[in-house]
Amino acid sequence: MDNQLPTGVDVVVAAQTLGSTIRRTPLDMSLRLSGIRNQDILLKREDIQVGRSYKARGAYNFISSLSAEEREAGVVCASAGNHAQGVAFACRQLKIHAKVFLPSTTPRQKRARIADIGGRWIEQVIVGATFDEASAAAQEYAREHGATYVHPFDDPRTIAGQGTVVKEIFEQASAPPAAVVVPVGGGGLLAGTAIWLHTFHPEVKVIGVEPEGAPSMRAALDAGHPVTLPHIDGFADGTAVARAGDITFEIARQFVDEIVVVPEGALCTEMLELYQVEGIIAEPSGALASAAVARFLPDLPDGPVACVVSGGNNDVSRYADIVERSSVYEGLRHYFLVTFPQKPGALRHFLDGVLTDGEDIVLFEFTKKNNRETAPALVGIEIQEPERIGELLARMEESPLSIEKLEPDSPVFSFLL
């Protein structure tokens, strides 16, 4: 398999192919993260790339390599949204027709952007609930119609294009980074990063970061080969891939130093920090690298560390859910089932005898209203410091009310919220 793998030289050629077609995105210092880690943490801003994602690099490099006959037959791709925008951009630039297969979980904002970027050169097909289902449908269509399937990550041309991100980082950094941290879905960006660094800076540490709900590369490395995860959480839709690529796995196996997994709640906290402190609107997958640096990488090497903010296609309507997930993960928001007896003063006792200063009700909803004896309610409470939950639970234990805490990992919690 080794002789089939792309190399750092392929990344250099891809950079020449891309030329000025894509943006040379900034490499910004994060004072927040640098303060947390006591070392320089740099953010590579691919969230402001063409299509608001690094994916345009790989898509353009792939499609520009096609012969005249292949261009005439058109291309097909499957995507959770960002790769499709890259394909749409490349097809419009090169005047090639494409059919784009998207899972039903693709945010509406990404669908609209695909249409805007690609114009008349793009046709969208919504199929399946996951990227992998959309990919299977796209590949079947390509076989039946003679179109070229533009793989979002597991093709040498795509991988080489994605590797141009790290090449730019080293051209922009005032001092060479000691480590590069990148998000991982199918592994195209990770593989492109690893092959360029292996060729030109083999001393630099390569770290991949996956969401807890879709750790396909971690599973592949543990098993010794790519495996299909039985279930994935689509929250971090840009990296919600059930199976790592064959080529990307082999590159990761040989050249990647570490893969870490980040819980979705911590990812949400980092998205809010990026927005509130750095002014960066990152999609969930775009916050993976910096979330890992903030909390989950205790052994970073000395020297500058570069994090790739891989995408900024986040629907603003998702921020309520992001705040909710972050608050629950941080231990600042808790939910309870409280059974109130149907008699005067029951609610007043809860407000005065259970809650205290700094504890606010953020949700109060009766779950059953046809029982005359009791009235169960779903109650959400926000506290100022996570350490105060013990005091609150102690007062609830002393209360005559029946109060059940809903744990975030319980089926009841996910059903009610």
Image (cartoon, rainbow, N blue to C red):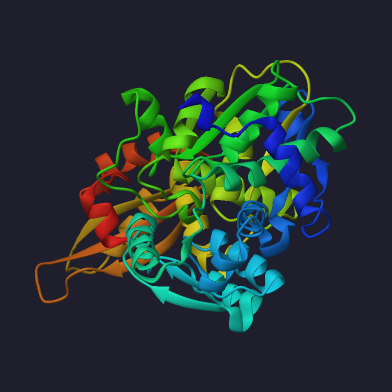
In the foreground, 233 or 278: 233
- Asked if 6 appears above or below 319 in the picture, the reply is above
Q: Where is residue 205 in the image (x, y as percent from the top left)?
A: 65, 21
Location of the C terminus by quadrant is bottom left
User: Quadrant location of residue 120?
Assistant: bottom right
Q: Residue at x 49, y 53 (%)?
A: 151
- Please, is residue 138 above or below residue 159 in the view? below
Q: Which residue is drawn at 27% across and 61% down?
A: 416
Q: Where is residue 110 in the image (x, y as percent from the top left)?
A: 55, 69
Is residue 190 left or right of 243 when viewed as pictured? right
> Who's the residue at 33% across and 46% down the image?
408
| Quadrant showing the N terminus | top left
User: Is residue 197 visible to us here?
Assistant: yes
User: At which x and y percent is residue 402?
Assistant: 19, 51
**Residue at x 43% of width, y 47% of height:** 328
Q: Residue furthest right?
A: 174
